[in-house]
Image (tube, rainbow, N blue to C red):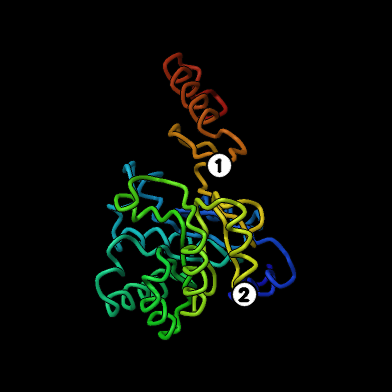
Amino acid sequence: MKSKITVTKLFQMKKKGEKIVALTAYDYPFARMVDESGIHVILIGDSLGMVVQGESSTLPVTMDEMIYHTRLVAKAAENAMIIGDMPFMSYQADVKEAIINAGRFIKEAGAAAVKLEGGADVVDTIKAISRASIPVQAHIGLTPQSVHQMGGFKVQRDEERLLNDARKVEEAGAFSVVLEGIPADISQKITEAISIPTIGIGAGPDCDGQILVLHDLLGLHDRHLAKFVKQYTNLGDTARSALKKYVSEVQSGEFPGEEHCY
């Protein structure tokens, strides 16, 4: 068994120029496969609202749902670092409540860290959670929980604001920062300007690491894919073909055959 990935390991990887590979997962079977593949970080993203629950955004996802899915993934992962994504309104209203909710990810679900969205506007929350000995990953640029405020899922191009956000979350104690929907040249400047690892999603090749949504990568749904997604296979088509074959064989009497009987 490999050694567990830690915050220290991620810092070392950035210093050495070794790329960090991250991916989302939401249940035990897929988390086992993701972990066995050599992924360094598994994020249980609130993206589960869209890819698992069928919602149109991440906003309806609750803390209890996030704890449930994070616990499933943490059981499966022996090597990858587990990060629980703090859902909408689990940290925005009150810093004390944010600490309690972050603590639930560690105590109840087995996560090693939490992620929350926002830049300079959430530095007090990042500081407070970090002071409670809970590692925090920040998330700047296109932040899905702010989709209504942003007027949709739009690429973020305000270089000065983004650089300020990155510096502020680092100063607040974040161990890493996700850069989403940011032009590659700005992401490169951010990555060079801060000492903590940057994890890109739609942010170009110069980030310290990359993350994608598992279901996008594997082709497990038929929703629109963002430009930054690379679909490495199409398990959706494979599964649909297998299911149709099962229906056909049951109806024709081909299944179960003699070899499937006691």
Q: Position of residue 223 (x, y in %)?
A: 43, 34
Q: Position of residue 229 (x, y in %)?
A: 55, 42
Residue 72 found in image quarter:
bottom left
**Residue behind mark 2:** 195
Disc 1 or disc 2, which is closer to the eye?
A: 2
Q: Secondary structure at mark 1?
A: loop
Marker disc for residue 229: 1
Q: How many C-alpha atoms fall within 10 Å of the one at disc 1: few (<14), some, or many (≥20)?
A: some
Q: Position of residue 224 (x, y in %)?
A: 45, 34
**Going by the image, does 165 lie left or right of 89?**
right
Q: Amino acid at mark 1?
A: Val
Name the foreground residue: 210 vs 221: 210
**Going by the image, does 243 lie left or right of 23?**
left
Q: Residue furthest left?
A: 93
Quarter of the image containing the N terminus? bottom right
Q: Residue at x 39, y 50 (%)?
A: 48
Q: Is residue 55 above or below residue 191?
A: above
Q: Amino acid at mark 2?
A: Ser
**Going by the image, does 167 lie left or right of 90?**
right
Q: How many C-alpha atoms fall within 10 Å of the one at disc 2: few (<14), some, or many (≥20)?
A: some
